[in-house]
């Protein structure tokens, strides 16, 4: 028996940011904490947000989200939440601010540390419905965090873990493609490949959820069709809309779980001295994982080819590697700055990651080591 949940109300349209006041009122928020990052502050997007937050107060803005959100940043934001007497959160940004905001919503009402909530440690059982209400406003088209039940966070001990619970679902999502128009080409490409990886991995997951399969395939097809346009012409609002919808659909498909690509990319995000965008890491790892999964995915590979309009004998690993190259992303871990000496530790961490549990083919630590090696050069 499958348990199928699609629970987040979504306002989706160019200009949808104007619905924020009614969502704040619907949730009964009087003093929401705004969670974002400094890049969005510099870009002027928080000024646009402020115009739609009744009684906006700059003292209730946390903009210290790092590229990979950390437990320390969550603690600092949660402290600000309590100091300012906040009663909810408005998160604006890419996956990092949205995930950090979920961590804040949790620690605002639950005693830490975050490690006790890690999915691999059975943390879901410790998360109750008493989570601070969250409105999520994505400014990238890739993570799907605005409709996801997970936050991926780097703990104080350096581990990158998933905290997962239906109680972490945002109470509202506002998806406005106009907010992505300022996204530069490289970030457009990386976040777009993140959405594409989500579509592929959720569809290939063996969990029984046909609605999620339909969402994943349609989102995947949208992403593949429109990502090159969005990268080439960032002002193409139609392409931006299609990419935001692809991200949303593939995020909704998270209910099926992910796979080995994400099990491998999460440790990369916590690697000391290396900065690699999550979506870029996914794009690099996809070909090797697709080849690994091919022996047990013949029927689903055929459905993917049909959805993308590819020949029946098309090599999906080659196709997605070429797509990543077309949108200007690095194709190997080496060119992305990942040292070969780190591969053993990465493989050990990947084998412990929650995402690998729903890969269509079991993956051992030795398998992960070979997949990293294959993706390195």
Image (cartoon, rainbow, N blue to C red):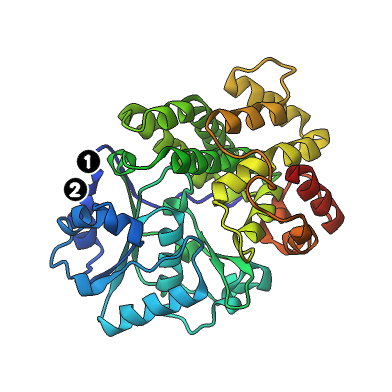
User: Total label count?
Assistant: 2
Cα gap from disc 1 to disc 2, whole angstroms: 6 Å
Quadrant of residue 275 within the rendered picture:
bottom right
- The residue nearer to you, when weighing 92 against 345, is 345
**Disc 2 residue crowd, few under 14, some 14–19, many 20+, Cα 10 Å:** some
Residue 188 image point, x, y percent:
44, 39
Disc 2: which residue: 18
Residue at image position (18%, 61%) is 53
148 versus 165 height, above or below: above
Residue 152 found in image quarter: bottom right
> Percent from the top left, x then y, of residue 291?
78, 35
Q: Confirm or deny contact between disc 1 and disc 2 (CB under 8 A).
A: yes
Q: Is residue 347 above or below residue 81?
A: above
Of residue 241 and residue 231, the one placed in the foreground of this image is 231
Give the residue displayed 54% in from the left and 66% down from the top: 153
- Residue 297 visible, this angle: yes
Q: Is residue 339 left or right of residue 95?
A: right
> What is the secondary structure assignment of the residue under circle 2?
helix
Left or right: where 63 falls relative to 277: left
Q: Secondary structure at mark 1?
A: loop
Residue at 17% x, 56% y is 52
Residue 169 in view of the camera:
no
- Residue 210: image location, x then y, percent: 60, 38
* Image mark for residue 15: 1
Q: Position of residue 227 (x, y in %)?
A: 47, 30
Q: Residues within 10 Å of mark 1 (few under 14, many from 20)?
A: some
Q: What is the residue that sits farthest to the right in this orientation? A: 366
């Amino acid at each position: 028996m499958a348990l199928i949940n699609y629970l987040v109300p979504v306002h989706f349209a160019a200009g949808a940011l104007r619905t924020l006041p009614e969502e704040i009122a619907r949730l009964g928020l009087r003093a929401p904490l705004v969670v974002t990052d400094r890049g969005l502050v510099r870009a002027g997007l928080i000024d646009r947000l402020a115009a739609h937050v009744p009684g906006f107060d700059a003292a209730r803005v946390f903009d210290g989200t790092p590229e990979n959100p950390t437990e320390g940043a969550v603690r600092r934001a949660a402290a600000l939440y309590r100091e300012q007497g906040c009663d909810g959160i408005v998160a604006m940004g890419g996956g990092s601010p949205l995930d950090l905001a979920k961590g804040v919503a949790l620690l605002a009402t639950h005693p830490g540390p975050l490690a006790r909530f890690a999915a691999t440690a059975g943390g879901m059982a410790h998360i109750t419905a008493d989570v601070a209400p969250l409105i999520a406003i994505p400014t990238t088209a890739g993570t799907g965090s605005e409709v996801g039940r997970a936050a991926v966070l780097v703990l104080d001990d350096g581990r990158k873990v998933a905290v997962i619970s239906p109680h972490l679902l945002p109470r509202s999502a506002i998806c406005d493609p106009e907010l992505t128009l300022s996204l530069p080409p490289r970030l457009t490409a990386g976040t777009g490949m993140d959405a594409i990886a989500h579509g592929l991995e959720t569809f290939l997951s063996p969990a029984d959820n046909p609605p999620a399969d339909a969402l994943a395939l349609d989102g995947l097809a949208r992403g593949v069709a429109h990502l090159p346009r969005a990268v080439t012409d960032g002002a193409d609002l139609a392409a931006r809309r299609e990419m935001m919808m692809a991200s949303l659909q593939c995020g909704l498909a998270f209910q099926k779980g992910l796979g080995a690509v994400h099990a491998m990319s999460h440790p990369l995000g916590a690697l000391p001295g290396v900065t690699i965008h999550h979506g870029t890491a996914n794009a690099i790892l996809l070909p090797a994982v697709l080849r690994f999964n091919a022996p047990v995915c013949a029927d689903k590979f055929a459905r993917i080819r049909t959805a993308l309009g590819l020949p029946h004998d098309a090599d999906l690993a080659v196709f997605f590697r070429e797509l990543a190259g077309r949108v200007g992303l690095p194709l190997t871990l080496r060119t992305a700055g990942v040292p070969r000496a780190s591969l053993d530790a990465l493989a050990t961490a990947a084998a412990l990651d929650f995402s690998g549990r729903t890969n269509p083919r079991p993956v051992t630590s030795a398998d992960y080591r070979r997949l990293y090696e294959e993706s390195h050069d």
